[in-house]
Image (cartoon, rainbow, N blue to C red):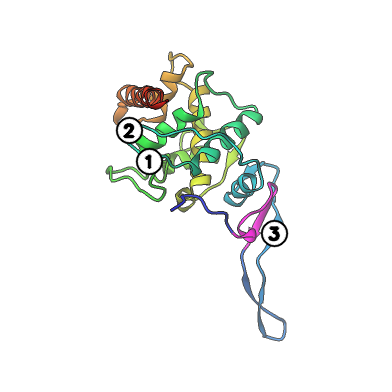
Amino acid sequence: MSLTKRPPTLKMAPPGLHVVKRQARISKNGIKYFVKAHLRKNRGKKIVLLPENLLYLYWHGDQEYPNLGKVKGYGEFPELDSVIQFWLNFWKEQGLKFPDDLDPFLIKTIIAIESRFRAAVRTNLPGSSATGLMQVTNTTRKDLNGKSEDSQYNLKNNYLDLEMSDFTDPVINIAAGIRWLSYKFTKPKTGAKKNLFNKLKGYYYWNDDGEAYAHKVLNLYNDSIVERLRKRP
């Protein structure tokens, strides 16, 4: 069963617009009637991508990307390969920075470790709200919208306005997860260098065990590459 499915047309909207759901209204004569779902222009000067915008961008964009291959110990999940590559390319085109040695397959490895490719999974760690393929948390959700409880972590651009329920959709989850990877790369902890290893440490901050997590991701990534090379004819 595929993890990705194209949503109905009125679940998507180009950036700058939002979906207004079917609504019940009362006329001046007291007659109840319904207004069909439709698109409406966003208000405010702040440029924000909503869930319907993320879905529109992906499902109306280029989805023809090469197969990334299998993460060792997991299924292949080829339907996610185009999602990963689309969003990595998209965020780079918006001017966001990533480590030079970050490749799409490494992101697929992160997904394997974070969720075992279970799109709707929610963490069982006490006190954590991590949800979906890249285990996006409610704290991260607020940071991505520029509404962090600690203003030093607020984004300055490329905001995402999402609800926790949105993160069970693979397209939205991966869009947010990769956006967060860029942020963690450009905002390392004080004194830490901007490199791939520290970016991986920053992505996982549960109990400050980021170093072990970074080693785990890189080890699985390298083991997967070796396994792939061994299986070549």
Left or right of 138? Residue 20 is right
Of labels 2 and 3, earlier in sequence is 3
Is 9 magenta? The answer is yes
- Where residue 98 sits, quadrant-wise, is top right
Q: What element carries label 1?
A: loop
Magenta span covers which residues? 8-20
Q: Distance between the residues labelled 1 and 3?
A: 38 Å
Q: Is mark 3 on a helix, strand or loop?
A: strand
Q: Where residue 143 is drawn, which disc sits there?
A: none
Q: Mark 3 points at which residue?
A: 39
In the rendered image, residue 24, in percent from the top left (x then y), is placed at 62, 75
Q: Is residue 156 visible?
A: no
Q: How far apart are marks 2 and 3 (CA)?
A: 39 Å
In the rendered image, residue 204, in percent from the top left (x then y), is placed at 37, 30
Q: Mark 1 points at which residue?
A: 75
* Amino acid on which the number 1 mark rests in the picture: Gly
Left or right of 207? Residue 222 is right
* Amino acid on which the number 2 mark rests in the picture: Trp
Of labels 1 and 3, earlier in sequence is 3
